[in-house]
Structures are given as structure tokens and as C-alpha cells.
Image (cartoon, rainbow, N blue to C red):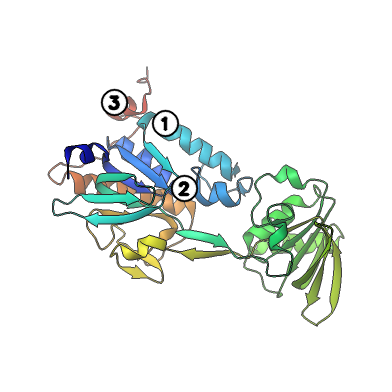
Amino acid sequence: MTEAASRDVISTECLIVGAGPTGLFAVFELGLLGIKCQLVDTLAHPGGQCTELYPDKPIYDIPALPVCGAQELVDRLLEQIRPFGAGLHLGQEVSLLVPRADRRFDVETAAGTRFDAGAVIIAAGLGSFQPRRLMVPGADACEGRQVHYRVRNARDFAGKDLLIAGGGDSALDWTLDFCGKARSVTLVHRRPHFRAQPASVARMKELATAGRLRYLEGTISSLSIAGDRITGATVLGADKSLAEVECEHVLAFFGLHPKLGPVADWGLALEKKALRVDTEKFGTSVPGIFAIGDINTYPGKKKLILSGFHEAALAAFGVQHHLYPEQRQFLQYTTTSPIMRQRLGVAPPD
């Protein structure tokens, strides 16, 4: 490598691939250990699925926060990692990751950004993902205006006639959230069994019985379009009956097409399209490469943000040991450790 070329390479102790909640928290855990890092994400903004798919969705299982909006969680994490000055490279997909003989890694993005990394943490969530789309004539032309696969701003739907499709948590959560805020809410699901939380399904059925929302078992078979605007939809029932629904917006929550993308070509052990890791330090089959969050798998794996935070903490110690194998590891606490408080920029207690 020429001297000019080497100046274009960003050298870092650790590179984190993925700037969702788990990747952002990994910055914090690494920072407490005095390890500097850079982050890369394919999206144009940090936050991963929380920001991209449901920024206004309430989250109830973050410790000490009884309820927290998805975007609020991301904003809090960004504030938490501010003292550590991590470099953020957005809108870039990592296309190449090559281990070197000196235990470091050459990493390059499709945009041409290059890194010399001592360790790599993959926190890429579901990988490259696209929402499953509503496959009826006219839906693609209305996408982003009246057909939606995510809710960017819940206020946009207040006072509107909404048709929500799907049987998972996103569909049920938004159905319950918009009931009473939208002018009307109709939920359509293709079968009587739901993938959502049982309490949400029970509440939806209570509201349907009370006439506060409409529930239809079936599938959207066509859209009614006047000019370039959706005015309604036809739902084909399981019994082949047809029901007409007046609506201004269709919100389809059919899940995602998860794709590992380039990660699948990095020579890492896979199991059911996820990266297999140990549960001591969440290392992959390649020493120095770790995987945390939804992209990994191990016995007992639970795809929860809370679990990802736990994995980030242990992976940070794994990174420290990989970078500095001769260094003894000490468990320190932010409440009592002067060096940790210094790294956080927090004044010592009186």
C-alpha cells in the first residue's frame, strides 16, 4: 500500500457494522473500556429498524423507562455515546471484510471508505431488509402517499380513515394506537390466529365488539382509486365474501424480507441465515469478529433490544481481550471508577 493510499484508510480499534440500538450501545460499552470505534450503516440515519420502520412506536421493556418511543430511545443512545466521539459513516454498505495475518481487518464500503480495524462488531440487525409489499394493482403507484409500510409520523394519520393489514405486533400496536385518533380504523388479517402479543389481540377484539374499530378476516384483493387517490379497498373474506372499506391510507405490516447481503460472503459460520456465536463474548467463527443483536444466533436466543444490550456489554470485553490479550481485565463500575467517570466526562461525586 502506498503512503498516499494509507492516509486514506481510517484506522480504528473497533469497527461496528450497524448503527441500530444494539450497535449504538456497543459504542458506550467500548467507550467505558477506553476503546475507540467507528460505525458504518447502510441507512442514511442512525437507529436501524427503530428509526426506519417505527419511530413513533412505544417500547415498554427498556429498564427504568416505563414507556419510550423508538426514536426517543435512539436519541437517548446518541446522547449517551456523545462523550466517546465515535465516527459515524452513514448511507454506506460494508462490501468487503478481509482478515489479515496480524489479526487486524481490512474493511471497505461500497462507497469506497476503507478501514484498518483491530476488531469488528457486526450489529446489522436483520441485515439488508425490505418490507413485504401489498401485491394488488395500483399499490406501487400510491406507495409513500397512501400506501405505507412504516409510520414515520403518527400525526399524519390523525383524523383519517385507515385500513391496517397484518397480524403481527406492528399491525396490532398501530391499530390500538390509532383507535380514537383516526376517524376510522379497519384491521384486516388473513387468518384468525395472530403473531402479536395475546393482550394486544384481546384488546383489539374488545374494541371491535364495542364498535370502535372494524376487524375483518381476509385479504385486500383490490384498491378503489379515483384519479390518483385511494378512496377505498375490497377485502376478500376467508368465506369468499367481499367487504368494501372506505379508507384514505393503507398501512401494510406484512413483515420484512431479511437478507444478510455481503455478510454472507465473509466466511463466518451461519445457522438459519444468522451468525453463530458463543455466549461468553459473542464471538463468531473468526477470531476478532463479534456479532450482537438480531443478526446472531445461539441456544436460547431472544430477539429483544434488551438482549442486544447484554450482548454488547460482553462483546466489548471480548474486543478488549482480542486487542490486548496480555492486559488483565477488571470489572469497574461507573458509580465508583474515577477513570470511567473521566471517560464519561462526569465530575467525581462529592
Q: Earlier in the sequence, mark 3 or mark 2?
A: 2
Quarter in which the C terminus is drawn:
top left
- Label 3 and label 1: CA atoms lie apart by 19 Å
Hey, what amino acid is under mark 3? Answer: Pro
Q: Which residue is mark 1?
A: 82
Q: Are marks 3 and 1 in contact (CB under 8 Å)?
A: no
Q: Are marks 2 and 1 in contact (CB under 8 Å)?
A: no
How far across and how far down the image is residue 309, in percent?
42, 48
How far across and how far down the image is residue 134, in percent?
68, 66
**Left or right of 244 on screen, residue 109:** left
The reply to whether residue 318 is visible in this rendering is: no
Hey, what amino acid is under mark 2? Answer: Gly
Hey, what amino acid is under mark 1? Answer: Arg
Q: Earlier in the sequence, mark 3 or mark 1?
A: 1
Quarter in which the N terminus is drawn:
top left
Q: Which residue is mark 2?
A: 20
Image position of 107 with respect to 200: above or below: above
How far across and how far down the image is residue 288, in percent?
23, 53
- SS category of the residue bearing label 2: loop
User: Mark 3 or 2, which is nearer the eye?
Assistant: 2
- SS category of the residue bearing label 3: helix
Q: Which residue is mark 3?
A: 338
Q: Residue at x 70, y 45 (%)?
A: 154
Image position of 284 with respect to 8: above or below: below
- Label 3 and label 2: CA atoms lie apart by 29 Å
**Left or right of 229 on screen, residue 280:** left
The reply to whether residue 21 is visible in this rendering is: yes
Q: Residues within 10 Å of mark 1 (few under 14, many from 20)?
A: few
**Left or right of 105 on screen, residue 168:** right
